[in-house]
Image: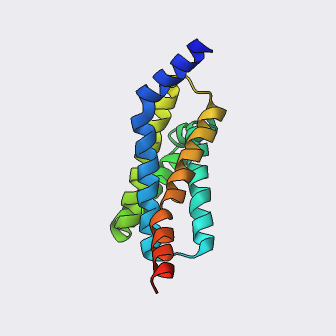
């Protein structure tokens, strides 16, 4: 038990920064979503996007890697890749805020995933852990809204 406690403490001391950045990034993204006053269905969709992105970099990585590598083995694959990159460029220019937030989320998710690989997390555990942190970040973005509502209810 003593050894396990020591290794858990070492794990948290070593990798806390990437995990904190992941939570902060999703909290910031949630604040952006609050600012846009999106519908509850869009909140659910963003939660599914967070889980889907986590799945892609953990459990789904072998399949995604295979698809990407197959894409570079034919002229059709190069054509599809070029169209995809061109479409992303259009999105980056026309929807810059969304593109910037998603780029930030991808970057911090990959950083946390690398830290999980260094820590020796299995893919399933990494998926659950990173999904939980992402959803925690989205949930924390509701705190200012709930506090403002509570204050408004106390002082109408």
From this view, report whether residue 20 is shown above or below residue 100.
above
Q: Is residue 48 left or right of residue 140?
A: right
**Is residue 62 among the parts visible in the rendering?**
yes
**Is residue 66 among the parts visible in the rendering?**
no
User: Which residue does the image show at 50% across and 53% down from the upper left?
Assistant: 137
User: Which residue does the image show at 58% across and 70% down from the upper left?
Assistant: 42
Q: Nearer the viewer, residue 140 or 96?
A: 140
Q: Is residue 40 left or right of residue 145?
A: right
Image coords of residue 10 (percent x, y): 46, 21
Q: Nearer the viewer, residue 40 or 101?
A: 40
Across the whole image, how many numbered discs are drawn on residues? Answer: 0
From this view, report whether residue 76 is shown above or below residue 7.
below
User: Which residue does the image show at 46% across and 48% down from the upper left?
Assistant: 23
Image coords of residue 98 (percent x, y): 41, 64
Q: Which image quadrant is residue 46 in?
A: bottom right
User: Which residue does the image show at 58% across and 57% down from the upper left?
Assistant: 49
Image coords of residue 78 (percent x, y): 47, 47
From this view, report whether residue 123 is shown above or below residue 2.
below
Q: Which image quadrant is residue 62 in?
A: top right
Q: Nearer the viewer, residue 4 or 128?
A: 4
Of all residues shown, which one is farthest toward the right? Answer: 124
The quarter in which the N terminus is drawn is top right
Which colour assignment does the render follow? rainbow
Of all residues shown, which one is farthest toward the front? Answer: 154
Of all residues shown, which one is farthest toward the top? Answer: 3
């Amino acid at each position: 038990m003593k050894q396990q406690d020591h290794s858990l403490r070492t794990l948290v001391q070593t990798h806390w920064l990437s995990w904190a950045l992941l939570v902060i990034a999703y909290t910031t993204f949630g604040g952006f979503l609050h600012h846009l006053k999106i519908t509850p269905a869009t909140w659910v969709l963003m939660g599914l996007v967070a889980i889907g992105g986590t799945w892609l970099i953990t459990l789904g990585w072998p399949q995604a890697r295979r698809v990407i590598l197959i894409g570079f083995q034919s002229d059709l694959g190069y054509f599809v890749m070029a169209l995809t990159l061109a479409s992303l460029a259009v999105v980056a220019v026309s929807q810059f805020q969304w593109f910037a937030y998603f780029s930030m989320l991808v970057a911090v998710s990959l950083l946390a995933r690398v830290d999980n690989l260094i820590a020796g997390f299995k893919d399933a555990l990494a998926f659950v852990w990173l999904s939980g942190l992402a959803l925690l970040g989205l949930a924390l973005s509701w705190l200012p809204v709930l506090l403002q509502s509570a204050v408004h209810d106390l002082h109408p």
